[in-house]
Amino acid sequence: MTVVEDLAPTPRVEVKPRGADRRERWQRRLPLLPALIYIVIVTQIPFLVTVWYSFQNYFWDQPGGAHWAGVSNYSTVFTSAAFRSALLRSVEMTVAAVIIAMILGVAFAVLLDRKFLGRGVARTLIITPFLVMPAAAALVWAGPMLDPNFGLLNWLLEPFGVHHVAWLSTHALGSVIVVMIWQWTPFMTLIILAGLQSQPADTLEAAKVDGAGAFATFRELTIPHLRPYIELGILLGSIYLVNTFDAVRLMTNGGPGTSTTNLPFYLYQQVNNAFDVGGAAAAGVVTVILTIIVATFALRLFARVFQFEEAGS
Amino acid sequence: MTAATAAPIRTTSEDPRRRREMAGKVGWGVVAWVVSIAFFLPVLWMVITAFKPESAAETWPPQFVFRPTLSEFSLVFSGMGPYLTHSVIATIGSTILVLLLGVPASYALSVRPVKRWRDGLFFFISTKMLPIVAAIGPLYVIALKTHLLDSIWLLIILYTAMNLPLAIWMIRSFMLEVPSELLEAARLDGAGRIREITSVILPITTPGLVSTALICVIFAWNELFLALNLTITNAATMPMFLISSVPQEGLYIAHLSAAATVASIPVIIVGWIAQRSLVRGLSMGAIK
């Protein structure tokens, strides 16, 4: 597990004599403070304000401003079927997209790790979807690719008996997930490729000499070696994909019905269409609490990936 | 069997085993190419459609042979000036700010770490897990009250906060790779912390900083949600321009494709050129 150490070697903590003075401690802290204060102000204050608004009755389209509402916003959130459905949809989308993107990413990385003619060009083509602006990707998929009347996909699938399917009305959730996968598979591919290329060649050589087949080598040596990379990819992918908004807003607008309304889009609607700042804030607070619960596990995983437990002691 | 592979190569192309291996290699190469092209196809189709006249863009079957035109592009270029300016300012401004804040912070979490560096690191990454969408209503109100609504400064401030945590993780991992002998030598020469950073750490970590900046640029350039909710005209960015290019009726697919191509192309080209850098950044400096 040498790679893991590469990923997060212990900082060089110098052993100081007992009376390590305050001055030294502050000199160490000083460079950290600007970034820390910045992040606390910009990310934490809006959330504190969110908590405050979540106890207010505040509609943008009604005069009179905000007034105290107790926990009524929260009882609405907890009894709201729309919120539960959006929550479920978020989980479905994120889990499906991350897992499939990771499986494809591993497959593509293995393909790209072999030498073949034009490998550099092929890699360039594969990473491109990650670079495409998500709003552009959503619009291009919704129009030129998936349109029932002139979309390229229907034309490509016609020989297989598919005739003018209106993907965005009949398979809306699947379509959105496909675009998420399309954009994030390159990301997974790059991380896994980095992992494959950091695999020591002599170990693989030794396995070959010992008569291990390609598949056995992959399962016994490569997969364990890739584990921290896979975990890193899943973590970063989830962090970004759970906030998917562009694809939902621009491909399906949450529909048909609420079939593609995930949490980000639901909250957006609450504020922009229902003008319900208080209700959206309460839903936001609940979302944040749920996220913190999931994130606690995720952070533990992060700690394992980077082996901080051992590194620190 | 084992001996054959391990022994010095004496085989010729007549050797059936070797020939099979060659065939296998070519076969996998073909598979890799097919997959790559399939993945690239939507991008290719976007660019092809952008060169079509509107009447050729919405046909069945799709047209592959047509008289290419730049008319949609010129239409796109004519309207995008202010959006482009806003995007460039927000992207570059926030990336510079990320580096200015991130480099010292990473130093304090790696080279000469504060006591609770681990908590600091986790605090930063944990802010990435808080969904910004949850606070969008209050964020709007705050922006309104501080007179930052629809201003480019607001986007710079928010994009910096959006990218800073990941940037700190990346920069830190690059700083840990600076050989301790070099730092030791600099200290013996009497270099203070500032000199240690400017003359030892920065030159060595420059490629890593470039990777980090690149990833910040990608995320800032492509960001839609905050721009959509918090800007109207004075700070509207390229993703907003793209959305505004979709009319409610009529033929618009070629125009849309041209706008999507123009909006995406800067980041695509930068990403293509800096592929290695991108890989280095994403794998958190795990490979060199």
Image (cartoon, coloured by chain):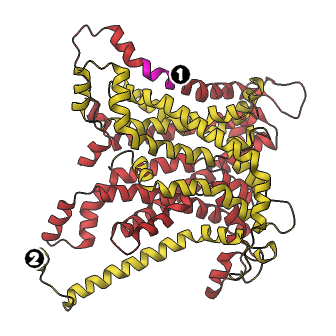
Chain colours: A red, B yellow
- Label 1 sits on what residue type? Ile
Question: Distance between the Cα atoms at labels 2 and 1?
Answer: 63 Å
Mark 1 secondary-structure assignment: helix
Span shown in magenta: A30-36
Predominant secondary structure, magenta span: helix
Residue at 64% x, 46% y is B223
- Locate residue B246, reporting x and y percent: 79, 59
Query: The numbered mark 1 sits on a residue in which chain?
Result: A
User: Where, by quadrant of the figure, is residue B163 drawn?
Assistant: top right
Residue at 32% x, 24% y is B112
User: Where, by quadrant of the figure, is residue B8 drawn?
Assistant: bottom left
Mark 2 secondary-structure assignment: loop
| Residue carrying label 1 | A37
Say which mark, if any, is on residue A299. Answer: none
In this orientation, which residue lies closer to the viewer: B168 or B153? B153
- Label 2 sits on what residue type? Pro
B127 over A20 or under it: above or below: below
User: Where, by quadrant of the figure, is residue B245 drawn?
Assistant: bottom right
| Residue carrying label 2 | B8
Q: Is residue A280 left or right of residue A298?
A: right
- Locate residue A84, reporting x and y percent: 66, 47
Q: Quadrant of the C terminus of chain A?
A: top left
**Label 1 Cα neighbours within 10 Å, binned few <14 / some 14-19 / many ≥20:** few
Residue A212 colored in magenta in the image: no
Q: Is residue B114 visible?
A: no
- Locate residue B142, reporting x and y percent: 72, 26
Q: Nearer the viewer, mark 2 or mark 1?
A: 2
B217 over B196 or under it: above or below: below
Residue at 43% x, 32% y is B122
